[in-house]
Image: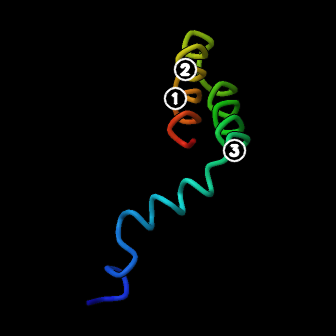
C-alpha cells in the first residue's frame, strides 16, 4: 500500500476539521463578504453557520 493510501479520506477530513476552526470560518466569510456584492452577504453568513455546525 502506498503512503498516500494509509491515512485515507477520514484522516484528511479529520485534519481539515482541526484546521477549520469557527474563527477561521468567520475570517473566510468576512473575506468573501468584503469582495462580493452586498446581496450575497446573507447567503455567505448562512453557509458559514452550516460549516460551523458541520465542524462540531
Q: Where's residue 6, x and y in %?
A: 35, 81
- Up-down relation of residue 42 to residue 28 (above or below): above
* Residue at point 59%, 35% (across, down): 52
User: Which of the two residues, 18 or 41, is positioned nearer the viewer here?
Assistant: 18
* Residue at point 55%, 53% (across, down): 17
Q: Which residue is mark 3?
A: 24
Q: Please tell me which of labels 3 and 1 falls first in the chain.
A: 3
Q: Do the residues bearing badges 3 and 2 touch, measured as CB atoms within 8 Å?
A: no
Image quarter of residue 12:
bottom left
Q: Where's residue 19, x and y in %?
A: 62, 56
Q: Which residue is mark 2?
A: 46
Q: Which residue is mark 1?
A: 50
User: Can you say which quadrant of the picture contains the C terminus?
Assistant: top right
User: Can you say which quadrant of the picture contains the N terminus?
Assistant: bottom left
Query: Mark 2 falls on what kind of element?
Result: helix
* Residue at point 73%, 41% (across, down): 23
- Up-down relation of residue 1 to residue 27 (above or below): below
Image position of 4 (left or right of 52):
left
The Cα atoms of the two marked residues, 3 and 2, are separated by 15 Å
Image quarter of residue 44:
top right
Q: Where's residue 18, x and y in %?
A: 61, 57
Amino acid at each position: 500500500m502506498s503512503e498516500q493510501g494509509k491515512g485515507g479520506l477520514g484522516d484528511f477530513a479529520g485534519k481539515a476539521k482541526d484546521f477549520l476552526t469557527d474563527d477561521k470560518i468567520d475570517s473566510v466569510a468576512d473575506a468573501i463578504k468584503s469582495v462580493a456584492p452586498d446581496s450575497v452577504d446573507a447567503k455567505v453568513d448562512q453557509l458559514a453557520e452550516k460549516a460551523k455546525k458541520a465542524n462540531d
